[in-house]
Amino acid sequence: MRLRSLKYLLKQGVSGLWSNRINSFASLCVITISLMMVGISVLISININNMIGSIESRNEVTVVISDGTPENNVNLLGQQLGENPNIFEVTFCSKDEAWEGLLSSMSEEEIRDFRYIKDNPLPDSYRIRVKDISELSRTVSEISTLEFVDSVESPDDFASILVGLRNVVTVLFSAVILALIIVCFVIISNSTRTSVYARRREINIMRYVGASKSFIEIPFFIEGLLIGILSAGIAFGITWLAYAEVYSMFSTDVSMLSIFGFGAIMPFEEIALPTGLSYLGVGIFISAIGTVIAARKHLNV
Amino acid sequence: MVEFRNVSYTYPTGQHALNHINLKIDDGEFAFIVGANGAGKSTLIKLILRELTATEGEVTVNGFNLSKMKKRMIPKLRRTIGVVFQDFRLIPTMNVYDNVAFALRVTDAPTKYLRSRVPYVIGLVGLTQKAKSYPNDLSGGEQQRVALARALVADPDLIIADEPTGNVDPARSFEIVDLLKSINDTAGTTVMMVTHQHDLVKYFGGRIININSGTIAFDEVIGGADET
């Protein structure tokens, strides 16, 4: 394929896009919506993962050892905890360390209230950290069954909500995206059929004068490519604006900050490139490939 | 060169369009194909253009064995054939120049060649003054000349004219055939012209192939009135 032909085919693709503008617009809208659904789903997943990661990084489960457990058994319990596949860090915290830690976290007034307590009431404990927070509940149950464990204190409620939310988002959005992709292919197929019909005279002549199959198909591919690129650009712009609003809400709203803390939502700059590339890739894949498949079906060259 | 060796074609509906046809048209020949509607003339043309593949026998066109040819070779075959249709099949949104150039553009011909070849061919059919006109501004005869220029522009070995005078007034019909004859004489291009107009055949004479019910009923050379 020479440059002069490419120029000609590019012109044909753009002209096809314009002459078939109503269908092209329909394809553009549905692909933009599909891309945004993909984007929203991915962005929600990225941010939930970010939140879960943040919880995981500072998660600490306290395994309270039964009072009066002999030192050998305390060590044995430590070994058993270390053998659990979902535990990656086990730190022993003696009752004295726990007491000092408690006092250091208190204000002077609170310490004064504690001055009458003669004996350290805190137990020995192990502080552990888990690898996968989604497995936290199961790990806590396993630890609870171990001998010499008095109780297990874990912050698993919020994490489990987030994990559940991520799973719901994944399933829900996967179904919606799949449905939208099917709709995209149907609309692209109809649009291409109309485009083929509108250009049937030229295509017919092309066949008789010996145009190659690819020469006949390329303008349709270019049409699809342009729709894909435009859709990706529009979807990216809308996502950017919407995300900026959400980010501002999470960063400045006191009630949101109290629930999620600082840095719960990633700034768009950090995810703009992968988001943009994903939009472009998926947009081009759906529209250009869809157009070529449909063109082959309707052209019958 | 076009050669049919014991060729039959049966449509998927079961209709036998051609039955054991044997035909050879040598390079540089001019042949009229005549016959009633439904006799098999269109099927014959479609087999030459490889729109259809013979159900039996072997078709050879310009060195291509169409019975064994792969689908991807069809464009290469068609670049050696120029086709003229009864309904002209011009693109109304393109002017005369672009309609003719279109046949070269889609075959990736060099721009320099296109710029010299297209005006030459338009001149050959006598439409230099109308190069910028659009098909709808031209008469039937002129439109057919544009179609002929488009068929000629890629310098084909064979021209198939499928009822080229069907939509043209009688006086212009003679001009069209005259033009085809002169192309045949000067460039040595093989011409196969399908027609219903017996007056044209009688006037120009030459090789006449009459197809009747899917078989060749008559294949002879007759003298024309223009020779007298």
Image (cartoon, rainbow, N blue to C red):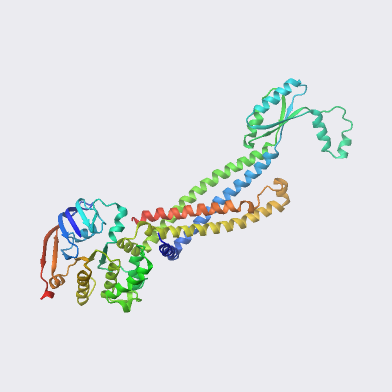
Question: Please, is residue A203 above or below residue B178 in the view?
Answer: above
Image quarter (top left, top right, bottom left or bottom right) of the N terminus of chain A = bottom left
- As drawn, which residue projects farthest toward the bottom? B129
- Position of A113 compared to A128: left or right? right
Give whichever of B191, A177 is nearer the camera. B191
Q: Would residue A143 be visible to someone looking at this image? A: no
Residue B208 point in image, percent of width and height: 13, 65
- Position of A153 compared to B38: left or right? right
Give whichever of A138, B138 is nearer the camera. B138
Residue at 14% in and 63% down: B209
Give whichever of B151, A196 is nearer the camera. B151
Residue B192 position by quadrant: bottom left
- As drawn, which residue projects farthest toward the front? B112
Residue at 54% in and 45% down: A172
Residue B104 point in image, percent of width and height: 34, 66
Residue A211 point in image, percent of width and height: 34, 60
Residue A13 point in image, percent of width and height: 43, 62
Q: Would residue A163 be visible to someone looking at this image? A: yes
Image quarter (top left, top right, bottom left or bottom right) of the C terminus of chain A = bottom left
Residue at 30% in and 55% down: B73
- Position of A293 compared to A149: left or right? left
- Position of A195 compared to B170: left or right? right
Question: Please, is residue A181 above or below residue B152 in the view?
Answer: above
Counting labels gives 0
Question: Please, is residue B132 above or below residue A229 in the view?
Answer: below
